[in-house]
């Protein structure tokens, strides 16, 4: 359960750099995840996370404490053509996407990842979409378990490899979508 001192909202432009640094830090600490020198373009994308706010139907959401500290973030895509991953996900219709979820280590276990994911699911429902798509890796086992608890199921047809790194697709079917 998320603590009452944390709220989920759209990122403000003056927070882009802080969120980018947080995501670079989170991803660079994942055991088994490629390091920046192995995938510099990926880390540059994380660093420039605010750029996603300019994409059609995209939202960059942040989890913020009562002290206005960003402790997590995620990108929601209401238009899968903007999703930008490898594989076939960008061709999905009647679908929303989630990418680049990250939670600061001091906020783990507080429901931040779940709250960010649920906010994206709610945005998908508001668009009337039938499913939500996301990708994860073996290094992201905490997120993987969270997604499964929320009802996401493996969607092998969405899998792809990014510079030698296996990336695994997941789908959540939405009722009434």
Image (tube, rainbow, N blue to C red):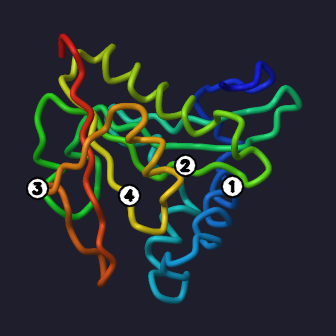
The numbered disc on residue 136 is 4
Q: CA distance from mark 2 to mark 3?
A: 29 Å
Label 3 sits on a secondary structure element that is helix
Residue wearing tag 2: 50
From what the image shows, is residue 23 above or below residue 5? below
From what the image shows, is residue 57 above or below residue 38? above
From what the image shows, is residue 21 above or below residue 11? below
As rendered, which of 28 and 54 lies closer to the eye?
A: 28
Residue wearing tag 1: 17
Label 2 sits on a secondary structure element that is helix
Residue wearing tag 3: 157
In which quadrant will I find the C terminus? top left
The percent coordinates of residue 32 (x first, y second) are 50, 78
Q: Earlier in the sequence, mark 4 or mark 2?
A: 2
Q: CA distance from mark 4 to mark 2?
A: 21 Å
Is the residue under label 2 in contact with that under label 1 (CB below 8 Å)?
Answer: yes
**How many other residues sit within 10 Å of disc 2, few (<14), some (14-19) or many (≥20)?**
many
The percent coordinates of residue 22 (x first, y second) are 69, 57
């Amino acid at each position: 359960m998320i603590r009452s001192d944390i709220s989920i909202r759209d990122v403000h432009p003056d927070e882009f750099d802080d969120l980018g640094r947080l995501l670079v830090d989170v991803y660079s600490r994942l055991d088994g995840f490629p390091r920046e020198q192995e995938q510099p373009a990926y880390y540059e994308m994380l660093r420039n996370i605010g750029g996603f706010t300019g994409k059609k139907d995209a939202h960059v959401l942040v989890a913020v404490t009562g002290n206005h500290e960003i402790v997590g973030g995620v990108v929601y895509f209401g238009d899968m053509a903007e999703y930008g991953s490898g594989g076939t996900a960008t061709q999905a219709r009647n679908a929303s996407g989630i990418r680049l979820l990250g939670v600061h280590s001091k906020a783990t276990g507080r429901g931040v990842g779940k709250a960010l994911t649920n906010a994206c699911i709610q945005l998908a429902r508001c668009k009337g979409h039938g499913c939500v798509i996301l990708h994860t890796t073996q290094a992201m086992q905490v997120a993987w378990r969270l997604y499964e608890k929320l009802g996401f199921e493996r969607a092998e047809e969405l899998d792809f490899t990014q510079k030698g790194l296996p990336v695994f697709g997941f789908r959540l079917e939405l009722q009434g979508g």
